[in-house]
Image (cartoon, rainbow, N blue to C red):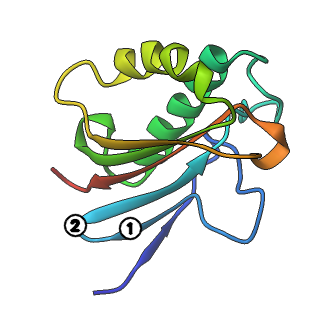
């Protein structure tokens, strides 16, 4: 089995030496998605709700580029700048994973790239 690098212009380019996603059948490993609008390279707002929405839109674009989708996500990890924003993040997360949500961890971190409020990574099944 060999790995396949996944890249799409529908999500922001990696901000470091890593791939947007790597497919290793039957799984797709999506790198942490920042709340950057792929068209402008700027954050989609300053609040955690707007930033969570953009992270999930970016995640969806990368998943689709890799032949998967939100419904096939089996594990997600959310990195929050401030755990006091957990409820606001969850309100948006729930809209994207309304039924059969994935397993998930959520951790508070000291700092995220470009001082984002949130970053989200995921593992999904491909071709399911």
The residues tagged by marks 1 and 2 sit, at their Cα atoms, a distance apart of 8 Å
**What residue did someone put label 1 on?**
23
Residue 109 x %, y %: 66, 46
**Which sits in the foreground, 74 or 64?**
74
The numbered dot on residue 49 is: none
**Mark 2 lies on residue:** 26
Residue 57 point in image, percent of width and height: 53, 29
Residue 33 falls in image quadrant: top right
Asked where in the image residue 90 lies, by quadrant, the reply is: top left
Q: Position of residue 66 (x, y in %)?
A: 40, 55
Q: In this orientation, which residue lies closer to the viewer: 122 or 59? A: 122
Q: Is residue 10 left or right of residue 94?
A: right
Q: Residue at x 78, y 27 (%)?
A: 43
Left or right relative to 69: residue 45: right
User: Left of 124 or right of it: where is 45?
Assistant: right
Do labels 1 and 2 touch, CB within 8 Å? no
């Amino acid at each position: 089995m060999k790995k396949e690098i996944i890249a799409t212009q529908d999500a922001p380019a990696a901000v470091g030496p890593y791939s947007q996603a790597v497919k290793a059948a039957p799984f797709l490993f999506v790198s942490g998605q920042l709340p950057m609008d792929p068209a402008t390279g700027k954050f989609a707002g300053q609040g955690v709700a707007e930033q969570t929405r953009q992270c999930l839109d970016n995640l969806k674009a990368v998943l689709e580029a890799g032949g998967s989708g939100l419904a096939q996500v089996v594990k997600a990890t959310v990195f929050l700048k401030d755990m006091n924003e957990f409820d606001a993040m969850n309100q948006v997360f729930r809209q994207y994973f309304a039924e059969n949500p994935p397993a998930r961890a959520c951790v508070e971190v000291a700092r995220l790239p470009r001082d984002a409020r949130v970053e989200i990574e995921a593992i999904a099944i491909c071709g399911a």
